[in-house]
Amino acid sequence: MTYQNEKKDEKIKFLENEIVSLKNIIDSKEAQITTYKSVNEDHRKLNGSLRKEIDDLKLANVQAVEDAKKEADKLMIEKIKKYEKKIRRLKNDAKDLLNYP
C-alpha cells in the first residue's frame, strides 16, 4: 500500500468514526427531546389537575361560607321571632295594665 492510500484510509476511518460519533450525539439529543416532551406533557397534565383541585377547593370554601351565612341568618330570624313574641306579650301586658281600673 502506498503512503497516500494509507492516508486516505486513515481519513476515511476517521470520518467514519466522526459519523458514528455524530449519529450517537443525534440519537442522544433525540432521546432528550422525547424525554423533554414527555415531561412537559406530564407537567401540563399535572398543572391542569392542580388547577381543577384548587377550583374545587375554592368552590367548597364558597359553599361552606354560604352554608354558614344561611345558618347564621336562620338563627338570627329565630331570635328575632322570639323577641317579637316577647315584645308583643309585653305590649299586651302593658295595655292590660293601662286598662286596669
Image (cartoon, helix red, strand yellow):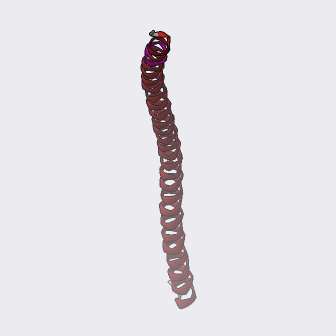
Estimate the x, y position of residue 19 in percent, counting from the top left.
Answer: 54, 69
Q: Is residue 92 magenta?
A: yes
Front residue of 30 and 8: 30
Q: Is residue 71 above or below residue 31?
A: above
Q: Is residue 58 above or below residue 86?
A: below
Say how many tags the image has.
Answer: 0
Estimate the x, y position of residue 59 in percent, counting from the top left.
Answer: 51, 34
Q: Residue furthest bottom?
A: 3
Q: Quadrant of the C terminus?
A: top left
Residue shown at the point (49%, 15%) measured from the top left: 98
Front residue of 18 and 81: 81
Q: Which residues fall within the magenta stretch?
A: 89-93
Residue shown at the point (55%, 76%) measured from the top left: 15
Q: Is residue 96 magenta?
A: no
Q: Is residue 22 above or below residue 61?
A: below
Residue shown at the point (50%, 47%) measured from the top left: 47
Q: What is the quadrant of residue 11 in the picture?
A: bottom right
Residue shown at the point (51%, 42%) measured from the top left: 45
Front residue of 10 and 93: 93
What secondary structure do most residues of the magenta stretch adopt?
helix
Estimate the x, y position of residue 2 in percent, counting from the top left.
Answer: 53, 87
Front residue of 32 and 76: 76
Estimate the x, y position of residue 37 in percent, counting from the top left.
Answer: 54, 51
